Image (cartoon, rainbow, N blue to C red):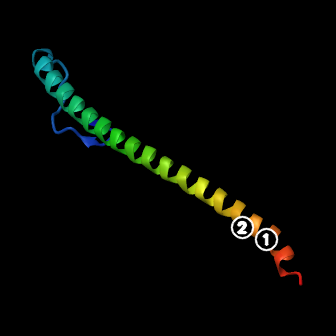
Amino acid sequence: MSGPNGDLGVPVEAGAEGEDDGFGQAEYAAINSMLDQINSCLDHLEEKNDHLHARLQELLESNRQTRLEFQQQLGEAPSDASP
């Protein structure tokens, strides 16, 4: 029997109830390990996302400030340019 990502390498036999406990524990341990790895990757991605979000907020604020300064300069430029 294969999982969504391919064959687990351990066949599941019908009527092998006595061996099912050992296989089940090994399978659960493998799944638990994979879930731990996925959780670790997701934590890392969340940290990166938070960092990028903070940097983008800083960039947005910087752009707003620059735009306001530019608009103020444009507003003052005609009065400065007149003789």
Kindly state the secondary structure of the residue where label 1 is placed.
helix
Q: In this view, does 79 lie above or below 71?
A: below
User: Mark 1 = which residue?
Assistant: 74
Residue 38 in view: yes
Q: Callout 1 environment at 10 Å: few (<14), some (14 to 19), or many (20+)?
A: few
Depth check, front residue: 41 or 61:
61
- Tell which residue pokes out farthest to the bottom in this image: 83
User: Mark 2 = which residue?
Assistant: 70
Point out residue 12 in the picture as x, y percentages from the top left corner: 19, 28
Query: What residue lies at 28% left-to-right and 33% top-to-bottom?
Result: 35
Q: Are marks 2 and 1 in contact (CB under 8 Å)?
A: yes
Question: Splitting the image into 4 quarters, where does residue 17 fall?
Answer: top left
Depth check, front residue: 38 or 6:
38
Depth check, front residue: 72 or 50:
72
Q: Which amino acid does label 2 sit on?
A: Phe
How far is the residue under mark 2 from the one under mark 1? 6 Å
- Tell which residue pokes out farthest to the right in this image: 83
Query: What residue lies at 82% left-to-right and 77% top-to-bottom?
Result: 80
Q: Which amino acid does label 1 sit on?
A: Leu
Query: What residue lies at 55% left-to-right and 50% top-to-bottom?
Result: 57
Query: What residue lies at 44% left-to-right and 44% top-to-bottom?
Result: 50
Q: Callout 2 environment at 10 Å: few (<14), some (14 to 19), or many (20+)?
A: few
Residue 2 placement, left or right of 42: left
Residue 17 placement, left or right of 53: left
